[in-house]
Image (tube, rainbow, N blue to C red):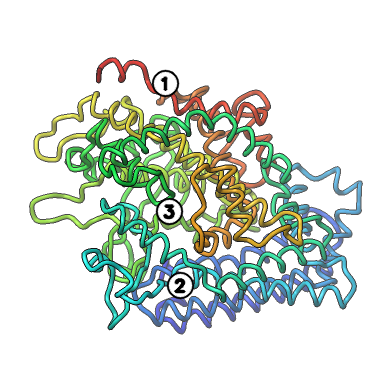
Amino acid sequence: GLFGVPELRCPEGFQAAQDKALQESEQLVQKACSTPPGPETVMIFDQLSDALCRVADLADFVKIAHPDFAFREAAEEACRNIGTLVEKLNTDVELCQSLRRLLADEVVMSSLDPETRRVAELFMFDFEISGIHLDEEKREKAVNLNVRILDLCNEFLTGAHLPNKIDKHVLPEHIRYNFTAEGNYLQVAGLHADCPDDLVREAAYKIFLYPNAEQLSRLEELLASRNSLAQLVGYDTFAHRALQGTMAKNPETVTQFLEQLSEQLSKRTQKDFEMMSKMKMKLNPQNSKLMPWDHPYYSGVLRAERYNIDPGLYCPFFSLGACMEGLNSLFSQLLGISLYAEQTQRGEVWSEDVRKLAVVHETEGLLGYIYCDFFQRPDKPHQDCHFTVRGGRLRENGEYQLPVVVLMLSLPHSTRGAPTLLSPGMMENLFHEMGHAMHSMLGRTRYQHVTGTRCPTDFAEVPSILMEYFANDYRVVNQFARHYKTGQPLPKNMVSRLCESKKVCAAADMQLQVFYAALDQIYHGKHPLKKSTTDILKETQEKVYGLPYVPNTAWQLRFSHLVGYGAKYYSYLMSRAVASMVWKQCFAQDPFDRAMGERYRREMLAHGGGKEPILMVQGMLQKSPSVEDFVDALVSDLDQDFETFIMDS
């Protein structure tokens, strides 16, 4: 069966796995309601969470990645059913009472360890954001809003990726071939951001971002429903609700962070825009005004001109085997951990090229398993991601339930003449996703509810982004980057040039992210919104980003992150700031320092989500960082490295 789950030998097995989870959860609900308040209450709640997550997490992965449609469909159904049950349990008054009795008992609470206390509070938080404390009528309203929001999210996501059609005669004949023809229409399915023809990019931008009335009303209803739900359960705005328990803690801190960052970036961003403008003028003298469709293209042109980074020159040094050896060697030196390939049983994996790795510590033994689904295949989504399939926890019998995760990439297959070769970007993504996997393996918490990466969004990306710093350090790269034919190491100046090339127009790129994050905060802030979502986009774009808004476009209708990262889009920037501080303070001097590796494990990875994120950061940096520190860390990363600059000059 899939992942060694005997029921999942066939798609119908999802029904059996669900039934088993439902039965188990019924018994646990009864047990929770009849158990006197104490640590056992938290244990039972966590078992309940585990019984449901074991099916839901696995199904979450299978529904998007399994090559067999029947498996995907069965998994989708399982997700829906478990989701409905979770909503029901979150509004089960009797179940909530059993937890409330524990939280109200000061004597028992003071006897619990901090992790158990936090987990009890997190479970209570789940009840409260579902409106458990409301009267019957309002509670029903909360449930209905939750259901409606879920549907709107799915509809908005679908709409965000739908192509727009246009009569082909509207476009000049010489650019029509760039778009898919359908009778008399052309389909525009994206922004064509890398196309060298300015006119193609302009047409794609104006057509793909042309406002769709249905999608607009979906977004408005989604934002209004989120706000109604937040206010119903006692929050000022949806952002206040979403940021509870995060590193930022509240929307005011996020706004302060984004405003200060924007201020610090403004001069550099202007400089970047001026350079892009000059480049546009050089290549297209008739029309040199910089527009939003120019930014990604001309920053790429500048990068190529200044550093001439041809990925083809790097790929031969980054064979998949060499990169995996590099990760193994780094983890072994930093954390005493090795990765071993394991044989899989029949039916355990969903594609024959999936590899299973056992993660083994030199003294603690087996920590868990990573399934590597690394290669392209038809119908496989083109996203690099990490999935928790089973969370770690301490079982009732004293054994530890080992975590199981999947890392999904889209690497090319090997050919007759060459192994799988990674571009520098793919290599960095592999390190990034492995950072998540190590968090999952080492976040060995007692409770499954807070295991590994089950932590606030603005902390979850810290371990993965930190791995990018290792992937860009010559001392690390030099340990594994070897030409697959000659065995020659990658020259140091090639690594330096690669790192410096990433800083070309990096301020403007970061400013764009600040704009997206600011827009997300406003949309999830005070309602009713002062203006339409498009007017807010126009105002924020011109104030925060700096390139002009284009009339009759509505970029926000393509902003799919509003679904999964509502009010939390800033998280990536804040996580990068923390990762940068950890790298500079703890690993830049010696990226293989075992004592630092152990401190990193002890302070940041070991707790999963079982400790307040800012306390983990304090433990690692041995100081409490301020918003100014976060901003300085991000901005100082943009500075050119003097040594490389001199070498290149």
Give, as a three-letter code, the residue at label 2. Answer: Lys
Q: In the image, is 293 to the left or to the right of 474?
A: right
Give, as a three-letter code, the residue at label 3. Answer: Tyr
Q: In the image, is 107 to the left or to the right of 468?
A: right
Residue at the image point whose x is 28% and y is 62% from the top: 376
Q: Position of residue 29 (x, y in %)?
A: 75, 71
Examine the image and state in which quarter residue 26 appears: bottom right
Mark toward the viewer: 2 or 3: 2
Residue at the image point whose x is 46% and y is 38% from the top: 508
Q: What crowding class fits label 2: few (fewer than 14 Cα within 10 Å), some (14-19), or many (20 or more)?
A: many
Spatial CA distance of label 3 from label 1 is 29 Å
Spatial CA distance of label 1 from label 2 is 42 Å
Out of 628 and 375, give the one closest to the viewer: 628
Label 1 sits on residue: 590
Label 2 sits on residue: 63
Q: Quadrant of the N terminus?
A: bottom left
* Mark 3 or mark 1: whose residue is earlier in sequence: 3
Spatial CA distance of label 2 from label 3 is 21 Å
Q: What crowding class fits label 3: few (fewer than 14 Cα within 10 Å), some (14-19), or many (20 or more)?
A: many
Q: Secondary structure at mark 2?
A: helix
The answer to whether residue 588 is above or below residue 90 is above
Give, as a three-letter code, the residue at label 1. Answer: Asp
Label 3 sits on residue: 369
* Mark 2 or mark 3: whose residue is earlier in sequence: 2
Q: Position of residue 435 (x, y in %)?
A: 45, 43
